[in-house]
Image: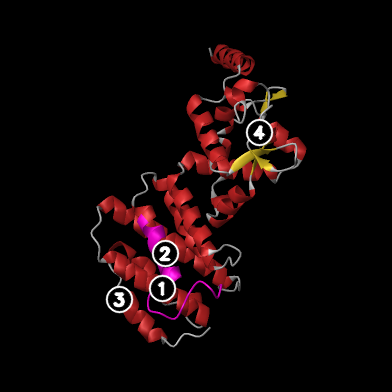
């Protein structure tokens, strides 16, 4: 794969990108982006699509979202180039807009523009960078995963990150994270909204439980009573895992970058209220108050 453009031409292209994207565009003509065919090819696509996006009219908040996703996508590409990762050869072409790579980048930036939760935006941007270096994900799949990323809430991204983290722990620490006092909690102790978000992840094929045949998905029809058949409501939290599709979305959105303290904040929401723990906390606070008096 070769790039016939000179670095000077990239600098001229960067000058066409203004507004909120200008700062990031300037980084695309330096460092790992210049000096290799892969770097200059990705820079060319990022600059061309950035310039095209800048021609459109967006509200100030949308421009901020686009700029953050653009910076995240660029930083992700830069990290891969610095690590020596190989750019996939079926994603970019030699056309000015980079072909399907340009189309996906445009989709990523437009998706970010309309995201009402700002916290989602950098992870939406990373999807472009990760797909650029991930040949096992075909383009139709990447487009579908972008649509999934668009419709998920930030708390659902936290849930995906949390269960990925839980699955990477040893059993003792895993159980300790989602124990309700001395017993693993069931999902039906969570708030109705959180249960609904989990059921949504299950319906989308992103989380599930291990069924009798060893596959991942919705619980077996006989799961703990006919009223909850096929749902996660009565599932033990320790039985829930990411599906292969959930793991793929987690990887492509780089959700391991979500801070651990944010994923840990949902643990009490998942476990639901625990009268015994709350009573111990109330007594402890009361004792502390008396000592202060």
- Numbered badge on residue 15: 3
Q: To which quarter of the image does residue 289 belong?
A: top right
Query: Do tag 2 and tag 1 residues touch (Cβ < 8 Å)?
Result: yes
Q: To which quarter of the image does residue 99 belong?
A: bottom left
288 above or below 108? above
120 above or below 220? below
279 above or below 45? above
Q: Is residue 52 magenta?
A: no
**Magenta highlight range:** 88-110
Which residue does the image show at 39% across and 57% down from the upper left? 68
Nearest the viewer among 207 and 161 is 207
Nearest the viewer among 50 and 228 is 228
Residue linked to disc 4: 219
The secondary element bearing badge 3 is classed as helix
- Numbered badge on residue 160: none
The secondary element bearing badge 1 is classed as helix
Residue linked to disc 2: 105
For disc 4, the neighbor class at 10 Å (few under 14, some 14 to 19, many from 20) is many
| Residue 75 rendering spot, x and y as whole percentages | 48, 64
Q: In this view, does 201 lie to the left or right of 26?
A: right
Q: How far apart are marks 2 and 4 (CA)?
A: 37 Å
Which one is in front in this view, the residue at disc 3 or the one at disc 2? 2
The secondary element bearing badge 4 is classed as loop
Residue linked to disc 1: 45
Of the image marks 3 and 2, the number of the one nearer the N terminus: 3
| Residue 243 rendering spot, x and y as whole percentages | 63, 46
Of the image marks 3 and 1, the number of the one nearer the N terminus: 3
């Amino acid at each position: 794969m070769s790039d016939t453009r000179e670095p000077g031409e990239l600098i001229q292209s960067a000058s066409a990108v203004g507004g909120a994207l200008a700062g990031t565009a300037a980084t695309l003509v330096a460092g790992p982006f210049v000096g290799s065919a892969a770097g200059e090819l990705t820079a060319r696509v990022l600059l061309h699509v950035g310039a095209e996006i800048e021609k459109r009219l967006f509200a100030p908040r949308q421009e901020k979202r686009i700029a953050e996703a653009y910076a995240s996508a660029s930083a992700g590409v830069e990290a891969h180039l610095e690590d020596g990762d190989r750019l996939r050869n079926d994603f970019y072409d030699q056309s000015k807009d980079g072909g399907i790579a340009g189309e996906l980048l445009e989709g990523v930036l437009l998706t970010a523009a309309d995201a009402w939760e700002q916290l989602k935006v950098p992870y939406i941007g990373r999807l472009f960078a990760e797909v650029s270096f991930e040949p096992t994900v075909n383009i139709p799949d990447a487009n579908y995963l972008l649509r999934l990323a668009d419709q998920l809430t930030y708390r659902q991204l936290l849930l995906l990150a949390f269960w990925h983290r839980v699955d990477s722990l040893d059993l003792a620490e895993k159980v300790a994270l989602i124990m309700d006092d001395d017993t693993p909690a069931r999902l039906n102790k969570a708030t109705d909204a959180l249960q609904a978000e989990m059921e949504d992840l299950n319906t989308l094929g992103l989380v599930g439980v291990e069924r009798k045949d060893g596959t991942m998905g919705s619980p077996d029809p006989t799961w703990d009573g006919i009223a909850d058949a096929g749902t996660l409501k009565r599932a033990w939290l320790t039985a829930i895992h990411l599906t292969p599709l959930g793991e793929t979305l987690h990887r492509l959105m780089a959700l391991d970058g979500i801070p651990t303290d944010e994923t840990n904040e949902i643990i009490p929401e998942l476990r639901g209220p625990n009268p015994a723990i709350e009573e111990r906390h109330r007594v402890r606070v009361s004792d502390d108050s008396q000592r202060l008096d």
